[in-house]
Amino acid sequence: MNALSPRSLRLIAAAIVVINGFFPAVWILLTSLKTETELVSKPITWWPHAPTLDNYVRAFSDQPLLRYLGNSALVALGSTALSLVVASLAAYAIARLNLRRRQLILTCIVASSMFPLVTLLVPIFETMRSAGLLNTSIALIVPYTVLNLPVCTLVLVSFFQSIPRDLENAAMIDGCTRLGALVRVVLPLAAPGVFTAGILAFVNAWDEFLLALSLNASPAMRTLPVGITLYQGEFSFPWPIISAALVVAIVPVAVLIALFQERVVGGLTQGGLKG
Amino acid sequence: MAAPGLFERLRDPSEKTLGVLLLAPAFLLLALIVVYPIGKLVWNSFFDMRLSGGSGARFVGFENYVMVWQDPDFWNATGNTVLITLVTVPGALVVGLGLAVLANLPFKRQWPVRLALLLPWALPLAFAGLIFAWFFHTEYGVVNDVLRRLGLMDARDPAMWLLQPGWGFAAICLTIIWKTSSFMALILLAGLQMIPRSLYEAAEVDGASRWQQFWQITIPMLMPSIVVALIFRTITALQTFDIPYTMTKGGPGNATETLAMLIHKNTIEYLDMGYGSTMAVFMFGLSLAVTAVYLRHMARSAA
């Protein structure tokens, strides 16, 4: 231990964390660049001998991957927008109004996220079936909005609380109504918080599997996780195409969190630790 | 038609009216997607709903409950779920704590380490399951390749990870630990960064070793974060579905089937809503107990 300098110790520590986090994604990227013959040769190769984009072409042509991408984007963006609106209103009320039992209200919203989704699955499935909404985007957008309410509300409450009350009071003295002050003064100042909550909601919705598998299983309505999991090969699981599809599905979210990592970490620790 | 008074009230409502208006959408959604389903779930559990499509359900009292209680599949799935929870929650805590301590070192560039912790969190569980299923592939998996290179495994007799009950279970647990430990690490890292440096400096002066500092300062100071992270992890571990579904589909046989998978199979695949709902009521009770622990903890730390 003492033989190593602090600098090389730090490098080893960083290497462990980075390899642990990146290896699976890197491995699937390497897999997606190999030809089918190379994939089933033994012993297996680590670095692709003749890198090819063929698997990507096939991922889009053999399966409706573009359709899955569209479904995922629509459901994730729709539920994110909706949960931001609903959570902003609720968070403002909790953070700013003189309500009795505000802690109880917040606890109710947070506790609702702790019920196992699979126990809510049957009634949600029945409701959507009788409303004729199975295999529509709405069937997922509404439940995802609720799933994201707790974390969005927690993040937004703490952002609203950090905005000085005086700014709002000044706006109201200048003739703004309370709602006017919310829309014109508080929301713009809370924009970073709204954005953070939005990223968390988007990632959650993009990742959800159980409801998407149960409510929207028809081939045209599948989201990415469901679509890729249910890929069927002629004889076996088509690993080359799967790995290419996985890379396509991972990239949007990976770019999003890479660009806004500080905010995501801040939001996660707020949403996780606040309660 | 709204009276002028009502319009004025809506334009600039009193504190209380505004509160009700602002909170209404959230609580309406919660009522629709959480409260109503729980009531409906309990209601369903008293009916035989096979082949009825909901219309001709037959009231059967506690018959479903007796049947679930005597169902070996139910106990198999419950046992698997509890075992996954008991293995992966402490596992993720230990790995997550290790990652957090490593990530807390003063690096010149923070982003590679931070992104390495965020990526597993952002990866869908189903994708983690698919990627690790490929890792553990008997013929072409990287895990067996590494074992072969290290001389730990005979290439002619590869480990059939996902095709054997015990090894399949181990592979699933490893995947869950990998996937969940980085979120744990992010939460714990935030806790680590709040520990004042002066505590360590004082311990250094008193001649405490690194190891002593870890157990006497780091762990006690981190306790609040650890407790919250453990409770959240336990609640999600009890719901384990995506990773076993994508890795083994509960197989071989039903050796790796979890409670969530059994409920999903009975309701969505077999459309036996009454029976599946009864199992869900059992599961609901299980997680309610954990939630109660959490809420008590929250109330105590708020006081």
Image (cartoon, coloured by chain):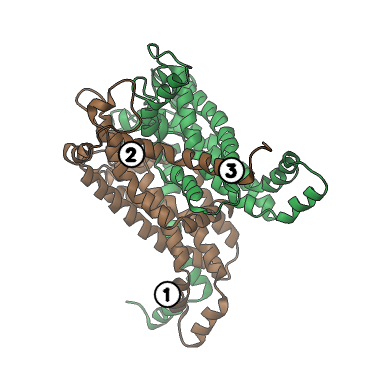
Chain colours: A brown, B green
Please tell me the numbered disc located at residue A29: 2
Q: Is residue A141 visible?
A: yes
Observer-nearest residue: A170 or A102? A170
Do tag 3 and tag 2 residues touch (Cβ < 8 Å)? no
Seen as rendered, the residue at the extreme right is B206
For label 3, the SS is: helix
In the rendered structure, the residue with mark 3 lies on which chain? A
Q: In the rendered view, does A242 fall on the left or right side of B239?
A: left
Q: Residue at x 60, y 65 (%)?
A: A100
Q: Residue at x 23, y 31 (%)?
A: A35
Q: CA distance from mark 3 to mark 2?
A: 29 Å
Please tell me the numbered disc located at residue A183: 1
CA neighbours of label 3 inside 10 A, class few (<14), some (14 to 19), many (20+): few
Number of marks in picture: 3
Q: Earlier in the sequence, mark 1 or mark 3?
A: 3
Do tag 2 and tag 1 residues touch (Cβ < 8 Å)? no
Q: Earlier in the sequence, mark 3 or mark 2?
A: 3
Looking at the rendered structure, the kind of residue marked 3 is Ser
CA neighbours of label 1 inside 10 A, class few (<14), some (14 to 19), many (20+): few
Measured from the top left, where is residue A18 in percent x and y? 48, 42
In the image, residue B168 above or below residue A242: above
Looking at the rendered structure, the kind of residue marked 1 is Val
What residue is shown with label 3? A8
Measured from the top left, where is residue B139 in percent x and y? 34, 20
Q: In the rendered view, does B98 fall on the left or right side of B199?
A: left
For label 2, the SS is: helix
